[in-house]
Amino acid sequence: MLRAPRAVPAWLAHPFRWQRLPVPWAAVARGALCAGPLLGAGIATGHPAPGVLAGLGSMLAGVNDRPGTRRTGIVHIGLPALASALGMLIGASLQAADAGWWIVPALFAVGFVSGAGSVAGPVRSNAGMQMLATTILGAGMPLPGAPWAKALYVLAGCLWLLLLRLVLRTPRPAGGALSGERAAVATVFDALADALSAVGGPDAEPARRRLTAALDRADEALRLRRLTSRLLRGAARTEERLLAERFAAATALCEASVALLWEARPLPSRVAESPRRFADALRTGRPPGRLSAPETSTAARGAFDQALLDAAVAFARREPEAPQRAEQAPSGHPAWAARPVAVIRGALGAVGGRTRRGRGLFGPAGRDYGLRVAVCIAASAAVALLLRADHWYWLPATVTFLVKPDLGPLFSRTVNRFAGTVAGVLVFAGAGLLLTGSWWPALMAGAGGALLPFATRHFALQTVAITLMVLSFVHVSGDPQAAERIVDTSIACGIVLVVGHLPRLADPRRRVGHRVTAALRSTEQFLRYVLESEPGADPTRRLALRRTAYRALGEARAAAETAAAELLAARDRNPDWLTVVTAAERIVDAATACAVRLDHGAHRPGRAEAEGLCQALSAMADALEDPHRLPERGLSGPDLPPVPDCATLTDVAVELERIRGYAGAG
């Protein structure tokens, strides 16, 4: 993203941030062939209502059409599609029942569920947002048809985009059915090479975070592949197990690389070249070629060269090291027949958050998320019904795309939403003056669909695309008053700014604190395992704990960065979340370096020393568990023990003191 000058407050600079992303040409083509043709087909056949509903469904699916493998695309698009159809069914049922003012409490309930779902990860958060949006549109848009038929049309539009995704895909590297997964693992090696090139420089920590994100995406793609293999065949094929071995080799190589990053000694360029050779091998199917010569000047470098050798062996194999027989159910049928529910539950947990977090859906953070969305939606629906009862849906629909607390700072989204809506209305109105006939709304919907994948760079541009499409649907459905949308959007932005910043609803200590607390607990579990595991212990458990810690820290950092850019009157009473997260990230890095050194014979700290460090970190997580009871200055906890025999653990102690100082003082 573009960096704003330091003198500009974060809440004021955030609306102008622009992401630099490659143009997803395949997604642009899918968008152009999605909502516009569906709406045009409805107009041409004299059945505009099905065209509007199918176009609406395809638009909502297009919002979730992001880069990834086919299987991740199915989950990222499919789950919100089901939620969108359910929302349309609820909303259309309210309209058919002529609910009147009962719409307000009904939307409050749906809004609460939608907001609470934000704690379950981005996929289920998008599903909740789209369920709320289609509930509002189904209850307000004057379209004929039975509720179940409207829901099916919306679902059909979503499935149309999903079909286009399976047909119109970006060219993939060699690899057949596994091409997407191979590309994801290749990206890990590329990110690893970038991180090694940054060792010793100011970009080392950001490069490590990008490496962590690449690992997350590859892990997600491979786990979904394994789950579908279990569902369809009961066991993975040979090429799937080979790719899993190569990803495991990449994970081990990344662990050793984190130790090199921690040592902060610049590396020769030939060291970073080796992971790129592995990436090219995955993309082309050719051998990786010559790798960098081994060197054992430090424990971290020795561990890296050993992991590099193991990766080379994994790439040289043409058969998995330990092939497994297909798991069978007791009756002799494939295992998927015995546990379809477990497989489906695993698929939902594989993307957008873990299943275990679903248990916190209605915990303190979930309740605060849900209350913020529900109050804003109910207030906007009540105001809209008072102002114009016949066309009330635009105002709460606008609020839906603004108020979700996990989607970005509220002030930034409000400013960009207003600017994007004004621009979209002006473009649509200009098109209406220049174009004639009944077909031009379909053309505008197609243009908005083509713009939507590119518009992920900035929320204002995304709003322009969505506004063009929604105005096309509204115009065809018989509500051509585009100018009123600017007034409704202004009112919606005002409601969100006032209601969304109420003290209880705007306090980030719950919605950020629960993620930071979870990250600290994951960090403590990894640190404890590193310090207390016996020599020669299975490294698989350690790698899994490290991945869990980094994943939790990534989620905590995203929440902390959003909170830092919020417009808050009580900012000085909140902990410095970003400093706490950064310190916890450095603890995981230091613990990783410590694990590498211990594997190579370094002095193992005493149990009392290890327990003291782990208890200190656990005490800080306990203090953040209930953020409303945070002390005014610093966090209490046991005194940190001296660790003179392990320099890495001294670094851990320093970062623990940093957390202690910044978590209690603004």
Image (cartoon, rainbow, N blue to C red):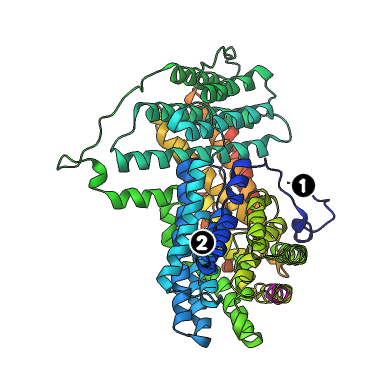
Looking at the picture, which amino acid does disc 1 mark? Leu
**Where residue 104 appears, x then y in whole percent?**
53, 82
- The answer, for residue 252, to whether it is visible in the render is yes
Say whether residue 198 is magenta: no
For marks 1 and 2, give the one nearer the viewer: 2
Chain part drawn in magenta: 488-494
Of 245 and 587, the residue lying toward us: 245
- Pointer 2: what residue? 54
Give the amino acid type for the residue marked by disc 2 in the picture. Ala
Q: Position of residue 372 (x, y in %)?
A: 58, 72
Badge 1: residue crowd in 10 Å (few <14, some 14–19, many ≥20)? few
Location of residue 492 with respect to 65 vertically, above or below: below
Q: Viewed as shown, does residue 355 lie left or right of 185?
A: left
Q: Which residue is mark 1?
A: 2
Q: From mark 1 to mark 2, how far is it between C-alphas?
A: 37 Å
Rendered image quadrant of residue 390: bottom right
Seen at 67% across and 64% down, the residue is 467
- Label 2 SS: helix
Image position, residue 108 (x, y; %)? 52, 77
Q: Which mark sits nearer the N-terminus, 1 or 2?
A: 1
Check the image and name the residue furthest to the left.
331
Q: Name the spot of residue 435 as percent of width and height, x first.
A: 73, 62
Question: In the depicted view, which residue is nearer to us: 539 or 476?
Answer: 476
